[in-house]
């Protein structure tokens, strides 16, 4: 049974209230899409007054961007240590897909349905708001461990090469609105990234497990 709206409003304050509103906005976006979502519909779903939303966000565009960022930040990515560069990348990219596939699909659909145009953001700016830090800086521990093992030489690998596996996975999710398959992730690692870094930078490639 749904709680009394007045009780709900009294119970939530500050950051707790803001987080609840952002989660409600995300749920509304998933259910009805960008075009049908309104500030009024989010307020009704949250059992609060619309003025509560407008005190925090000037319009639905800013509310939804904040909701997307909150969704992303509330589902952080793990950086596993499997003992090998290949294993770490496989686990990290698989975890990235599992944690972010729904976010990328919903956010990209919203962007193409009008959010991008109405915010005035560039594609690069929108991409940053949706994706955040899920590139090589996020996974630096993986590359540092591989460097220490002698598998790669970080002093001679450019940022664009380190970003490549993450960029390709994000590209697949954003363009296809669906997560890449396990076979696709293995292909990115085994057929593109590892041969590149092992051949160009003098490190030894890791054999694919049988």
Image: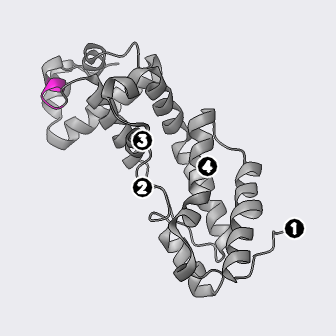
**Sequence-first disc among 2 and 1:** 2
> Where's residue 73, x and y in %?
37, 48
Q: Are marks 1 and 3 in contact (CB under 8 Å)?
A: no
Q: Which residue has dot 3 on it?
A: 130
Q: Earlier in the sequence, mark 1 or mark 4?
A: 4
Q: Is residue 124 left or right of residue 195?
A: left
Residue for badge 1: 210
State the CA–CA distance, disc 2 to disc 1.
Answer: 33 Å
Residue at figure coordinates x 18%, y 26% from the top left = 58
Instruction: Give x and y (percent) for residue 174.
Output: 56, 38
Check disc 2 and report the residue beneath it. Answer: 133
Judge by depth and name the residue closer to the eye, 112 or 20: 112
Residue at 50% across / 64% down in the picture? 136
For the residue carrying disc 4, how many other residues have a C-alpha within 10 Å: few (<14), some (14-19), or many (20+)? many
Residue 187 shown left or right of residue 59 in the figure: right
Q: From the image, state whether disc 2 or disc 1 is nearer to you.
A: 2
Question: Is disc 2 placed on a helix, strand or loop?
Answer: loop
Q: Which residue is mark 4?
A: 169
Q: Is residue 207 above or below residue 175?
A: below
Q: Disc 1 or disc 4, which is closer to the eye?
A: 4
Question: Tag 1: Cα neighbours inside 10 Å, few (<14), some, or many (≥20)?
Answer: few
> Mark 2 or mark 4: which comes first in sequence?
2
């Amino acid at each position: 049974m749904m709680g009394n709206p007045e009780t709900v409003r009294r119970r939530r304050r500050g950051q707790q209230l803001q987080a609840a509103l952002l989660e409600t906005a995300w749920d509304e976006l998933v259910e009805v899409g960008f075009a049908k979502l309104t500030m009024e519909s989010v307020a009704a779903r949250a059992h609060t007054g619309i003025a509560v939303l407008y005190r925090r966000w000037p319009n639905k565009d800013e509310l939804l961007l904040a909701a997307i960022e909150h969704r992303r930040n509330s589902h952080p990515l793990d950086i596993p240590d499997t003992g090998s560069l290949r294993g770490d990348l496989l686990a990290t990219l698989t975890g990235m897909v599992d944690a972010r596939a729904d976010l990328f699909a919903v956010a990209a659909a919203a962007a193409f349905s009008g959010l991008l145009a109405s915010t005035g953001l560039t594609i690069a700016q929108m991409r940053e708001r949706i994706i955040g830090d899920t590139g090589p800086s996020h996974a630096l521990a993986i590359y540092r461990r591989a460097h220490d093992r002698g598998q790669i030489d970080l002093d001679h690998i450019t940022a664009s090469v380190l970003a490549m596996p993450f960029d390709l996975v994000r590209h697949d999710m954003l363009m296809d609105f669906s997560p890449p398959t396990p076979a696709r992730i293995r292909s990115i690692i085994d057929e593109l990234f590892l041969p590149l870094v092992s051949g160009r930078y003098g490190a030894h490639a890791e054999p694919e497990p049988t």
